[in-house]
Amino acid sequence: MKIGELAGRAGVTIKAVRYYESLGLITPRRLANGYRDYDEDDVRMVREIRALGSLGIPVERTRPFLECLASGQQHADDCPASLAGYRAAIDELTERIEALTSRRATLIRHLRQAAHRNSSCPAPDDGENTMSDFHRLSADLPVPEDDGAADHLPGLKAPHLELAGTTGETVRIDALGSGRTIVYIYPLTGRPDADLPDGWDSIPGARGCTTEACDFRDHHQELLAAGARRVFGLSSQDTAYQREVVERLRLPFPMLSDPRLNLAAALGLPTFDVDGTTLFKRLTLVIRDGVIEHVFYPIFPPDVHAQQVLAWLRDNPVA
């Protein structure tokens, strides 16, 4: 057969076939008129070169495989030299992966350093109240309206529900102990190195989870002094994600993860959808002796919400 037919049957270009010939990987016989004549063995060889190329083995390193076929083996990798070719390709690929992984880690480190350097909620200095650093929410954020979605909650018993915490413990919502526990529920906490969902700022009540966390952080001791036994943040984000937020913001309280929104299902909590994902709407539960005593909903502005909870605790002391 002619070179064009060979190229078509093997799925390569005529130029590729000529390159294989220049390397001595295929050797067609010459007709009396000087034309090259290819046979089925050449088709098989070229197809093998193409298949090995799809595995990342360069044309120049296919010779052991082709020699294995030429020796009469059924498969090109039936020979020890072919297996050695595989190992060499794997070793080279491993080196490239390690180099790329190292480069990726370096890029991530630089991204996080740059992003955190300008974070709107840096970690506070010891003993310093840094609330003024966190009043950076846009002045034109839409204000959430009270749609009555939380009116049924006061007086309900806390459900029997276990949630993973960032400290490694599993917390039962119906077994928080005596006294008051504050559980502030939020949609999601953004990170400086990750984009928020499209249109996030235009959703009433969505923006402000980081500043809310910082407000609870800066007033944590005051909340405890005013009668709160424990404070938890709760969202549908996984524990690993939440743990990074706790460490970055130096939060003195744990976060609880509810990725399936089981608490919303158990209590009928309000939610909203964005980018195909269902998230909690922002609200805060005051749970006392296993019963929901008070609910804050809607919450605005979020960056002073801990102070709103603190004022309520002081106005409603436990007898």
Image: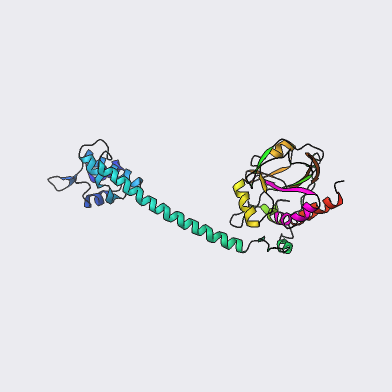
Query: Is residue 138 or residue 260 the one in the foreground?
Result: 260
Picture coordinates of residue 12, whole percent (x, y): 31, 46
Which residue extends farthest left? 32
Q: Is residue 215 left or right of residue 42?
A: right
Q: Is residue 241 left or right of residue 205?
A: left
Q: Is residue 300 visible?
A: no
Q: Residue at x 32, y 43 (%)?
A: 51
Picture coordinates of residue 239, whole percent (x, y): 62, 46
Q: Residue at x 20, y 39 (%)?
A: 71
Q: Which residues are magenta?
A: 212-236
- Whether the magenta-drawn stretch holds residue 307 is answered as no
**In the depicted structure, whether residue 68 falls above or below residue 139:** above
**In the depicted structure, whether residue 205 falls above or below residue 6:** below
Picture coordinates of residue 76, whole percent (x, y): 27, 40
> Which quadrant of the figure has residue 84?
top left
Is the image coloured rainbow, by chain, by secondary structure, or in one colour? rainbow
Query: Is residue 69 or residue 96 the one in the foreground?
Result: 96
Picture coordinates of residue 58, whole percent (x, y): 31, 50
Q: Is residue 222 visible?
A: yes
Q: How many numbered marks appear?
A: 0
Quadrant (top left/top right/bottom left/bottom right) for the N terminus: top left
Query: Is residue 144 or residue 298 the one in the foreground?
Result: 298
Q: Is residue 263 left or right of residue 151?
A: left
- Whether the magenta-drawn stretch holds residue 227 is answered as yes
Q: Residue at x 69, y 63 (%)?
A: 126
